Amino acid sequence: MSINDPQRPPRPQHTVTAIVVSHDGSRWLGETLEALLRQTRPVDRVVGVDNGSRDGSADLLTRSLGPRAVLTLPRSTGFGEAVTEVLDRLGPGGGREWIWLLHDDCAPDAHALQTLLEAADSDPKAAVLGPKLRDWVDRRLLLEVGFTVDRTGRRDTGLEAREFDQGQYDGTRDVLAVSTAGMLVRRDVWEEVGGLDPALPLFRDDLDLCWRVRAAGYRVQNVTRAVAWHAEAATRRRRRITASGDHPRRLDRRNALFVVMVNLPPRALPWALVRNLFGSLLRTVLFLVAKQPANALDEFLAFGSVFGHPVRMVKARRARSRGRGSGAVAAARLLTPAGAGYRRLVDRARNYLAGAGFVESAGRHHAVAAQRPQEDGEELLADTGVMQRVFGNPGVLLFLALTLVTLIAERALNGGARLGGGALVPAIGGASDLWDLYREGYHRTGLGTDAWAPPYVAVLAALSTVLFGKTWLAVSVLLLGCVPLAGISAYAATRWMIPGRWTRVWLGSSYALLPVATGAVAAGRLGTAVVFVLLPVYAALATVVLAGERRRARRAAWALGLLLAVGTAFAPLVYPLAAVLGALAALAFPRRGVAVSMLVAFAVPVALLLPWLVQMAAAPGRLLLEAGLHQPSLVDPALSAESLLLLSPGGPGMPPLWVTAGLIVACLLALLMRRNRMVIAVGWGVALFGLLTAILVSRTWVTSINGDVEAPAWPGVPLAFAATGMLVVAALTAGRITEFRAAGGTRRLVAFGVVVVAFSTPLLAAGMWIARGADGPIRGTVRDVVPALAAVNSAGGERTLLLRASPDRLLFTVLSGRTPIVGEADIPVPEGPRERVRLAAAGLVSGRGGDDARVLAAHGVRFVVVTAPVDPEVSAALDSQPSLARMSLSRSVGVWRLTRPVAVPPAPPGDPWHGRWLLVQTVLVIVVMVLAAPGRGENDEPAVPVDLPEPRREPVAR
């Protein structure tokens, strides 16, 4: 019989029309329909609406309700539009008609409808009633017993996180709103207030309807004796949303602001405007600080979408004012009290300090939605406490173990007053000093120069700013902490490539404890340490660029470009190595859009580092240098081929060669596997490319930036590339070891032997590092390079000529009256002044008379300092100079002062384009960070084109 048939006798007093709306919900729809059809108080009419499902939901509705009771609508139809379409086609049901709204993922208890109608009988003013909602998976878990919002739109259920139903909220109570999942609403009231707003296709449409119902003078009640189980598939991102093209989080936040602003009484509106303006700005800043740029962008755009269209807001308020009655003030009283918002802010801060992160409630519809969505049965695997979460996570255990090994191995460096030595300039000064060095157009350091400061100074300055302005802390984290940071970086970056967590533990520990890392720490190689931490991230992002969905690949390309710029700033050799590998990968794996993404990834570093890169191009040999000093004592001029093949770059801090033999054997065994041949070939291709580059680098002699030292380049960076390729190959074939172990017999013994060989590298490396310590020129406490006697008397900017002995000659450096800060040693000095000072210094040391002292005085040099060991011949030569007066002499240091007047050269006028380019550079960094920020979850599917309208069928009663 048709639903329009007027001859069907209505039930006494109440007529119930159930409307089930489905959209790709076949996973839950069967149980929902079964629960609907077994109600103890049967519904009078039922209509199913399918919004363009592609998973068989329409067929399931048809089989359960009959073909004449199902309406098919386009895929872009919202929930409110679907319900309105049904009611437009249905005539009155007779008596007091109720509309029972059901989502496809909401299964009511068998007594739910009967209980709701009994509650409606007891209160004639009740126009909207809703059941108590529990979680679909964990059926004891409370989701909602009605809800309210505060004046910023934050949804408030009044429940604790993961609160179980123990009857603590039982009873029928007045609430501001109930969910449309299981909502029972009088049809006459529905038509009076206008039903669900079609401008709100998803999220907060229930709040808007209930608010208007209460404002019209009716009651909205939650009946806890009626129970329904809700999966909240849209909120928990268990299915794609096609009713709107916006991200669910942004859509929810925008609708929340809109509903609050159009329903508040006029008297409360001005304060709400001001509060939401500053509140949204504050939340945007907090999201950025908490490293959640996607949330920050959603908050900002949602606010702009609402308040940027005042005409739409005014029209919506005018439409609601026509139905606003005596209940408007009473509805406003049900909003969350003002103090609750501040308590929630305190709770978020406490959770953040406890390690839970800054979690925002926008888009969260219940107390447990902030957690990762659980699959059916997954609650059995959920942990129950902080200790279990920490010590049950292999990644955390890896990081803690590597941190412990690092603290023990670096015991001689911990607690020092000033970290320095080797390639590392003493870490002095603060974040403001680094910012000044990077911003100034003319540097008074040394003999003075207008060259660009290295970009890594800005990176260190930013990190130092975050770390309370402490440069030494930033350097310590990057250099001394590079081993645990590299371990967790390798573990986390390979989570999509390597399926086994304990396999990734082996990969992370083996990578972190490579000789490249321990050598970088011992020699103070800050550049290599930073690149070593970033390299696994490069590999992960490059994989996404090559194989990911197009939009996700493009975001990964921007992120890769940004991080590649950081690595290039510390060690320029990273860029050509990555560029060659990227070009080969794009040719080997041609996909639509890959070439553009690769172009983006490698154009970003050029754009961000442009002035400095032009400066580098003038001396191509500098590509082989890195942040810090280039010294012959830090490299092995006769590095053997065996060392390179065993991933040992030479220099201080190297373990015995046999330590990495197990890793090499494990990687070679991967060549015997028949599976993953392509992956193995790619990995070994990267490894061979890195090894060949390392051989060339180790055989290339490079002059330091200021031309005073010549020594072979250190091959640590290309060997890190080679090790990455080898480790990924070995880890990807680890699944065969599990199969061998399960096979038993000889194969199990082989598997055990391979595991022992593979784990020998991280275990032996850790043991050797602990036993030897951070053995190298780096020290926890280093002395000031400039003696206090010279520093105190250089208040006017006078310079100091520093002389130090080398095996074959005497080297010199000009300092600006103090120990240089990080980055100053990497700023090139003009060749002319430097050559004149070099000749003058040589003349003083040789005892030659003439104008040597005058040349030094003309360049602002007031003091001559000889560092340990002080050669008696050099000190005698300086004493013989009439223009020098000895101030102090010992075995460790000697200080002389020029007797003639010293004139410090004035700084030339700065280049006006320097400041302008810094502004452009800042804007570029912000733009790249925004483009690199994830806009959707990692597993989001690509967008689907809008569907064409589908044919409609008239709904009829079942």
Image: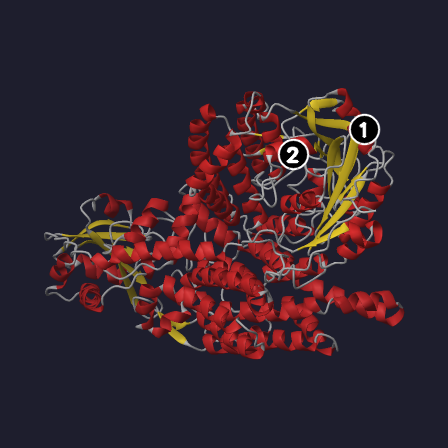
**Residue at x 47% of width, y 49% of height:** 476
Of pointers 2 and 1, the one earlier in the residue sequence: 1
| Quarter of the view holding residue 576 | bottom left
| Quarter of the view holding residue 149 | top right
Find residue 778 and report its horizontal and vertical position in percent.
46, 55
Find residue 383 and report its horizontal and vertical position in percent.
74, 42
Q: Is mark 1 on a helix, strand or loop?
A: helix
Q: Which of 458 and 662 is in front in this view?
A: 458
Tag 1: Cα neighbours inside 10 Å, few (<14), some, or many (≥20)? many
Amino acid type indicated by mark 1: Thr
Mark 2 or 1: in front is 2
Amino acid type indicated by mark 2: Trp
Would you say 757 lies left or right of 797 here?
right
Would you say 688 lies left or right of 63 here?
left
**Residue at x 15% of width, y 53% of height:** 904
Q: Name the residue under label 2.
A: 190
Q: Mark 1 points at which residue?
A: 115
Residue 824, relative to residue 673: is it above or below?
A: above
Residue 589, relative to residue 484: is it above or below?
A: below
- Can you see residue 147? yes
Residue 920, relative to residue 695: is it above or below?
A: above
Residue 519, relative to residue 68: is it above or below?
A: below
Residue 924 disc label: none
Would you say 435 lies left or right of 84 here?
left
Q: Which of 754 and 365 is in front in this view?
A: 365
